[in-house]
Image (tube, rainbow, N blue to C red):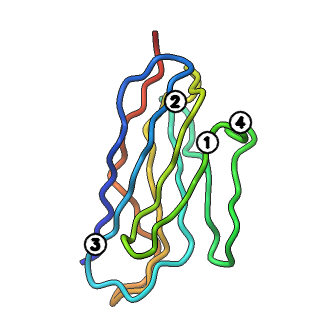
Amino acid sequence: QVQLVESGGGLVQPGGSLRLSCTASGSIFSINGMGWYRQAPGKQRELVAGIPDRGGTNYADSVKGRFSISRDAAKRTVYLQMNSLKPEDTAVYFCKMNIGATRSGDYWGQGTQVTVSS
């Protein structure tokens, strides 16, 4: 059974930094596209940063220049480095991976809370 586990959220002051991690486990044949999403109270879930299957990276305009997504294929892990955090970055952050497995498809992490406040 495929499972994604996230870590790294927490409370940080404006201007601070956090690094989120998401690791996949289980009987996995391949990991294709992956990304980080967030959902603030009363708002829809939105894409923050992604690594498409074809390679490269993409970012929401609101985080360009502040956030950086990366992956470690050997560890089946995707990271989100968040710098210069703002109160409007407060949300629950979710990772998503497109995984080739016995049951292939998109898998989501459980979510980790990021709160930016003084």
Where disc 4 sits, the SS reads: loop
Q: Please state the horizontal and vertical placement of residue 99, each as a whole percent of the image.
A: 44, 78
Which amino acid lies under the numbered mark 2 shown in the image of this protein? Answer: Gly
For marks 2 and 4, the one nearer the N-term is 2
Q: Nearer the viewer, mark 1 or mark 3?
A: 1
Q: Which mark is residue 25?
A: 3
The Cα atoms of the two marked residues, 2 and 1, are separated by 23 Å
Q: Please state the horizontal and vertical placement of residue 23, each as a whole percent of the image.
A: 34, 63
The Cα atoms of the two marked residues, 2 and 4, are separated by 18 Å
Figure check: 5 above or below 7: below
Which amino acid lies under the numbered mark 4 shown in the image of this protein? Answer: Ser
Q: Please state the horizontal and vertical placement of residue 20, each as a whole percent of the image.
A: 42, 46
Look at mark 4 in the image and give the residue it sits on: 62
The Cα atoms of the two marked residues, 1 and 4, are separated by 9 Å
Q: Nearer the viewer, mark 2 or mark 3?
A: 3
Look at mark 2 in the image and give the residue it sits on: 42
Look at mark 1 in the image and give the residue it sits on: 67
Residue found at x 47% / y 17%? 13
Residue found at x 71% / y 36%? 62
Mark 3 surroundings: few (<14), some (14-19) or many (≥20) residues within 10 A = few
Where disc 2 sits, the SS reads: loop
Residue found at x 57% / y 41%? 44
Figure check: 72 above or below 27: above
Residue found at x 33% / y 63%? 4
Where disc 3 sits, the SS reads: strand
Q: Please state the horizontal and vertical placement of residue 66, each as a whole percent of the image.
A: 65, 37
Q: Quarter holding the N terminus?
A: bottom left
For marks 1 and 3, the one nearer the N-term is 3
Which amino acid lies under the numbered mark 1 shown in the image of this protein? Answer: Phe
For marks 1 and 4, the one nearer the N-term is 4
For marks 3 and 4, the one nearer the N-term is 3
